Image (cartoon, grey):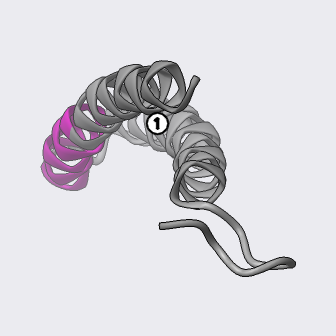
C-alpha cells in the first residue's frame, strides 16, 4: 500500500523518530555532565555528602536511561535499514 502524495512513508516517519531520539540522547549526555558537575561540587567543596549521595543515585539512573536510549537508537536504525532493503 502506497502513501498518498505529500504524506511521509513509514520509513520517513521512523527516521524522524530516530532523529528525535538522538536529540534526546544529546540532552541526556548534557544532563549527565551537569549532574556530575553538581555531584563533584557537593561531594568535594561543599561537603554535603547526603545530597551528593542522592545526586549519585540520580546520575546512575540518568546513565541507565542514556545507555538504554543508545541501544534503542541502534536497533531502530538497523530496523530502518531492513525496511529500506525490503523496499528496494
Q: Which residue is at the far right?
A: 6
Quadrant in which residue 67 is drawn? top left
The answer to which image quadrant residue 29 occupies is top right
Tell me residue 51's x, y (percent): 22, 55
Is 33 on the left-hand or right-hand side of 48?
A: right
Q: Is residue 82 left or right of residue 48?
A: right
Looking at the rendering, the stretch of residues picked out in magenta corresponds to 50-64
Q: Nearer the viewer, residue 10 or 65?
A: 10
Vertical placement of residue 86 versus 18, above or below: above
Question: Which residue lies most toward the front here?
Answer: 1
Q: Residue at x 45, y 43 (%)?
A: 35
Which of these two is toward me, 68 or 35? Answer: 68
Q: What's the magenta bit mostly, secondary-structure-wise?
A: helix
Residue found at x 55% / y 51%: 24
**Residue at 22 percent of width and 34 percent of height:** 68
Q: Judge from the rendering whether residue 4 lies leftward or rightward of residue 34; answer left or right.
A: right
- Identify the image quadrant of the C terminus: top right
Residue 27 x, y percent position in the rendering: 61, 48
In percent of width and height, residue 31 lies at 52, 46
Q: How many marks?
A: 1
Depth check, front residue: 76 or 12: 12
Say if the magenta span includes residue 60.
Answer: yes
Callout 1 secondary element: helix
Q: Nearer the viewer, residue 4 or 58?
A: 4
Residue 2 is situated, as x and y percent measured from the top left of the image, at 58, 66
Image point 30% across, 25% down: which residue? Answer: 75
Please state if 15 lies on the left or on the right of 28 as rendered: right
Characterize the local packing of mark 1: few (<14), some (14-19) or many (20 or more) Cα atoms within 10 angstroms: some
Q: Which residue is mark 1?
A: 32
Q: Is residue 56 magenta?
A: yes
Amino acid at each position: 500500500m502506497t502513501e498518498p502524495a505529500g504524506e511521509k512513508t513509514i520509513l520517513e516517519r521512523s527516521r524522524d523518530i530516530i532523529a528525535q531520539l538522538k536529540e534526546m540522547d544529546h540532552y541526556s549526555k548534557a544532563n549527565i555532565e551537569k549532574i556530575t558537575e553538581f555531584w563533584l561540587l557537593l561531594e568535594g567543596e561543599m561537603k554535603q555528602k547526603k545530597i551528593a549521595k542522592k545526586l549519585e543515585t540520580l546520575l546512575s539512573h540518568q546513565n541507565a536511561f542514556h545507555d538504554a536510549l543508545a541501544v534503542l537508537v541502534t536497533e531502530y536504525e538497523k530496523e530502518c535499514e531492513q525496511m529500506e532493503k525490503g523496499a528496494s
